[in-house]
Image (cartoon, grey):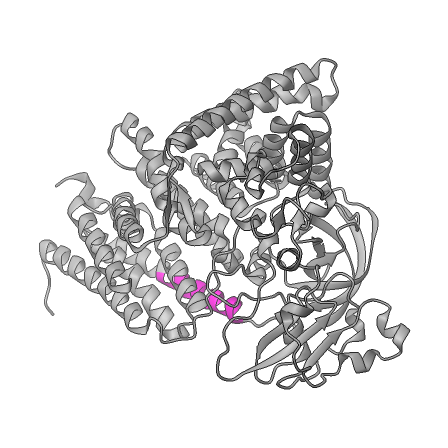
Amino acid sequence: MSPSMYRTPLSEVPAFLPLLSFSIFSALFGTYAYPFPAAFIISLLASVGWAALGTGHPNRSSLQVSAVLLVLTFLGLFYISFVISRGDEPPRTVHERGTVLSARKWGREASALVKSASGVFVLRLDAGSGIRTGDVVEFSGVSVPFKRARASREFDERLYWLAKGASSAVQVSSCKAAGRSLGPAAWRDSLSRRISEVLPPRTAGYALASLTGERDEILSELHRSVGTSHILAVSGFHVGIAFAVCWFFMKRFRFRLYAISAAIWLYVLLAGASPSSLRAAFMIEIMIAGRVVGRLGNGFNSACAAGSAMLLANPWLFWDIGWRLSMLAVLAITALARSELSRPVKAALASPLAWLATSVQAAWTFGSVPLAGLAANFLSLPAFAILFPVSWILSLPALLGIPGGSAASAVAEFLFERWEVLSLNILVLFPWETSFSNWLVLLCAPALTYFFAGASGFSQTRAAFASGISLAGVFLLL
Amino acid sequence: MIRLEDGAKKWALGIGGAACLIAAFLLVSAFHGNFADKGPAPVAPDEFAEDRGQGQASGREDGKWVVYVTGAVMSPGVYEVPAGSRVLDAVAGAGGFSSNADPEAINLAERIEDEAHIKVPRKGEAKAQGEASQAARPSGVQAGTSGAAARPAASSKQAGASARININRATADEMLALPGIGPKLSQAIVSYREQNGPFATPEGLMEVRGIGAKRFESLKDLVSVKD
């Protein structure tokens, strides 16, 4: 009897089951308007089926874990349905005081996400309002529901803001700054201004992206065309680099795990607390907690647990493209990490697998996915794992106003310029794009199912069987 | 009671699990398309959001009313709203209030009717004219008026439809009206023009660092190289 016979989805990755149920339920109930009982039963059938198919050697503890998971999933599904079915808040007059969590251009106007005592609002402002991230503002106006999408691929303003925690928009009749807050939003704004003032353009763009979560529009276009947009969105990759940097500097420190944990949350808050960075921070917390209690980490299960917890905290995240792509990529990579392949093979497969995992969703949302991403990601992940920390260190003297600091930041600029040339050359070599197609879905769904099944403790035969069911099911639906 | 051996349990679980998964797929397939597809796409990341925020009503469906929304809204025009809607729904359909709207001068809760004309007053407009309440009240549809004709340049996409922006003359501020063009890119276009001379064709925009084929695709119908 091989040890793998004792590995089951319930013992290996119990958190995958609620995540699977929550995701299927959200898609059916939220997107496709299935009645609650139908969505509920289908999502539970999928999870129970997955657990049963993957359990090669049932035992008493499997039953206990199943019971606990089933209860948790039940409660979670009821909660998600409650949040999703809650209607928009009726219009009302608001007179509030709050902190601007983020302020940005919105079409020809501006919008500000403001947290006040009675909730989070989106203020619609004139482009020249001068309201900045980190300001404390006093505003009054009428709260109105967000605009909904009319067609299936149209941008849905309501979902966009609900995923960010806002409850309604406010048509502002008056809004004035009443000071600056002392929280992370104000630090982010100050850092952003300092970066823009003293660093050369590429270094500033990458520093803004990695440290404050702001997108430089020129770099965004470049990375989008090469298929490496994720480099500019603070995600697990960036949090992982921050973790590695903290680990390097604190490895001799007695309470390093606690210090690293605090530093990671500080970084995530400073960088705008995007869903993907929060997910990564949750994963690191779970890993650290595992070390504290003497249990080895399981990246795949941690990713599932973080994803499930985030969906329970804010079910609207399911419709956030950043959250979806981040979850798919991290599940693929952590599933690969749990496979029995050799390290060099895993390293070689990580980038193509992450591309494969996210390609269907990305192609559906953006219309197409550049094939250059396959090659560019192969290089970009290791390159930026070095470029980011190196550029942070090289930018520090200029940011602190130390004489000669600009010379150090010029070195970072040179390195980023070389990367830009290289990525444009990759684009010349691979100019093709793949658009959304049924073939792409038929390729990706069984492949991902196989990897996820492997990571969940399925035997190879059962993983192949699950993959076959997935292929047949997708074929049926398409 | 029948007691299953380990091997039999293993098989029973496997077959039961597969049956559950197949049943789930069959149920999804059976219900597919039976319910009103709310159809929200996953939310696009930040850089796309600002350009996609303003949509238009598409084809007419049964049980829908057609209303004409003008004044201080993001996208004035003719819109379909569900029967029984209120002013609020029509305003939301037109992209919401624009920044110069006076939200307290219009009764958002008022019921509307098919063929209504809703005009949202601008700040100070209602007071100046002393007719805020009338402005909010639905009036009969105006024959021969189309949403597209009434649309002002407030919406960046619609601005392009009626008057293209001349990229050889426009200032950096003026180019901010183009979708996907922020302060950095508009400045980059101006700098490129100053260094390399006027653009011979709109396609020349793709020479500017930061404008690729995809972004140009969304700009090509909105820009020109001469007046």
Question: Magenta region, mostly helix, strand or loop?
Answer: helix
The picture quadrant where one finds residue A76 is bottom left
On the question of residue A216 being in view, the answer is yes
Left or right: residue A148 compared with residue A475: right
Q: Position of residue A421 (x, y in %)?
A: 49, 24
Residue name at image x 21 percent, y 55 percent = A53
Which corner quadrant holds the N terminus of chain A? Answer: top left
Q: Position of residue A84 (x, y in %)?
A: 51, 67
Residue name at image x 72 percent, y 85 percent = B139
Residue name at image x 28 percent, y 73 percent = B30
Left or right: residue B194 compared with residue A299: right
The residue lying toward the viewer, choosing from B133 and A210, is: B133
Left or right: residue B120 compared with residue B222: right
The residue lying toward the viewer, choosing from B139 and A406, is: B139
Q: Position of residue B106 (x, y in %)?
A: 77, 76
Left or right: residue A431 compared with residue B89: left
The magenta segment is A70-85
Residue name at image x 58 percent, y 33 percent = B209
Total of numbered circles in the picture?
0
Which corner quadrant holds the C terminus of chain A? Answer: bottom left
